[in-house]
Amino acid sequence: MPRKPATEEQREASRRQLQAAASSLYADVGASGVSARAIADRAGVSVGTIYSYFGSLQGLMQSLWMQPLERINARLTLIARAATDPVERIRKLLEAYVEVATGAPELFRGAFLFVRPESLEKPPRAAPDTAVFYALLIAAIAEGQAEGRVRAGDPGQLAQLAWAAVHGSLALPVNFDRLALETGQTIAAAMIPVIVDSLAPSGATGSAL
């Protein structure tokens, strides 16, 4: 007698079981210890189950961060809509990025500081503006340029530079934890006005924007 197909509730329970196993493995051994076999063993299922439910090991790992990221993206969008001044919007978005890093450190480490081990296949590269934070920065910079309050240049490149500066500030003490550096939150808070000032037109300052 053929086996009855799993119900949607059973499939969702299996997905959650795999996600819990992947999350606990990542927490225990870090990215370098993550493999399909290790996750399957921890979940008590076959390796093929991972591919059946998530398509790939990469798909499973990405699923761990998708729902939290969707909530963050919704929050960033609301912040952008509330700040009608484009320069203030840039500042607010950068501050929100820091708040995510400090308010949800595990999420930030997993989704934003994740270093892909060799055991994980590389996903197809998407256009940068598919990242909500980046797209919102581009829009704010372009609007500021239209008003003559942000310096000339490719908005995408300027957005990448701003993102790199605040992200690097947060990552520095994580990547060099053997050094007695200030906290990422402290470094990033001091970096944000520097970023905003750097986006000002030649001869202007952040306080004059």
Image (cartoon, rainbow, N blue to C red):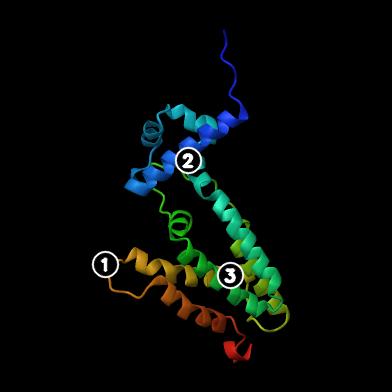
Check disc 3 and report the residue beneath it. Answer: 159
Q: Quadrant of residue 95?
A: bottom right
Q: CA distance from mark 2 to mark 3?
A: 33 Å
Looking at the rendered structure, the kind of residue marked 2 is: Gln
Estimate the x, y position of residue 19 in percent, counting from the top left: 47, 40
Question: Is the residue 53 above or below the residue 3 in the image?
Answer: below
State the residue position of label 2.
Answer: 19
**Residue located at (44% from left, 54% from top):** 110
Note whether 44 is above or below 62 in the view shown.
above
Q: Nearer the viewer, residue 73 or 203?
A: 73
- Residue at (43, 29) in percent of width and height: 47
> In this view of the protein, can residue 118 be seen by the observer?
no
- Near-viewer residue (49 or 204): 49
Q: Amino acid at mark 3?
A: Ala
Front tag of 2 and 3: 2
Residue 72 position by quadrant: bottom right
Taking the view exactly as shown, the residue that stands out farthest to the left is 178
Inter-mark Cα distance, 1 to 2: 32 Å
Which numbered disc, 3 or 1, marks the residue closer to the eye?
A: 1
Residue that sits furthest to the top in the current view: 1
Q: Quadrant of residue 1?
A: top right
The answer to whether residue 198 is visible is yes
As drawn, the label of residue 178 is 1
Mark 2: few/some/many CA within 10 Å (<14, 14-19, 20+)? many
Circles 3 and 1, Cβ within 8 Å, touching? The answer is: no
- 62 left or right of 31 in image: right
Mark 1: amino acid? Arg
Between disc 1 and disc 2, whose residue precedes? 2
CA gap between label 3 and label 1 equals: 30 Å
User: Marks 2 and 1: in contact by CB < 8 Å?
Assistant: no
